[in-house]
Image (spheres, rainbow, N blue to C red):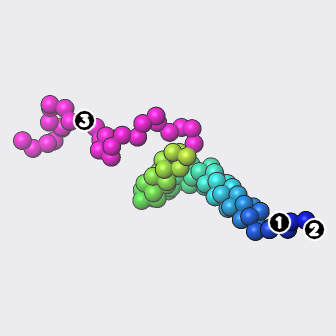
Amino acid sequence: MAIRRHRLPRFWLALTLGLVSGAVLAAHWWETQLPDRLERAARTGKLDDCLRYSEQLAALRWLGDRAPRSRGSAGASRPKASGRPSVGARP
C-alpha cells in the first residue's frame, strides 16, 4: 500500500500564493489609478483629496524600486533651519 499524501499543505500553499498575488495586483492597480484621481482633485480644487491621494501615492511608491536607499528618522524629511528668520517671522 502506498502512503497517502495529504492535500491540506497544497491547499494552504495555493491559498497563500493566491492572496499574496491578489494583494500585489490590488496595490499595483491602486497605484496606477491614483495619479488620475490626484489630477482630477487638483482640477476641481478639492485640496483635502489632493493631500490624501498624494500621501497614498507616496506610501505605495515604497513598494516599487523607486524607494530611497535609506529611510532615516521621521524628522529627517523636514528642512534644516537656517540662521536667518523666514519672511514674515516675528523676532
Secondary structure beneath disc 2?
Answer: loop
Look at label 3 and name its amino acid.
Lys
**Which residue is denoted by mark 2 in the rendering?**
1
**Which residue is denoted by mark 1 in the rendering?**
5
Look at label 2 and name its amino acid.
Met
How far apart marks 3 and 2 lie (CA) works out to 75 Å
Q: The magenta stretch spans which residues?
A: 64-91
Residue 80: mark: 3
Circles 3 and 1, Cβ within 8 Å, touching? The answer is: no
Mark positioned earlier in the residue sequence (3 or 1): 1
How far apart marks 3 and 1 lie (CA) works out to 63 Å
Q: Is residue 39 magenta?
A: no
Query: Which residue is pictured at 70% across the width and 57% down the height?
Result: 17
The one of 51 and 12 positioned closer to us in this rendering: 12
Query: Which residue is pictured at 51% across the width and 45% down the height?
Result: 62
Query: Which residue is pictured at 46% across the width and 36% down the height?
Result: 68
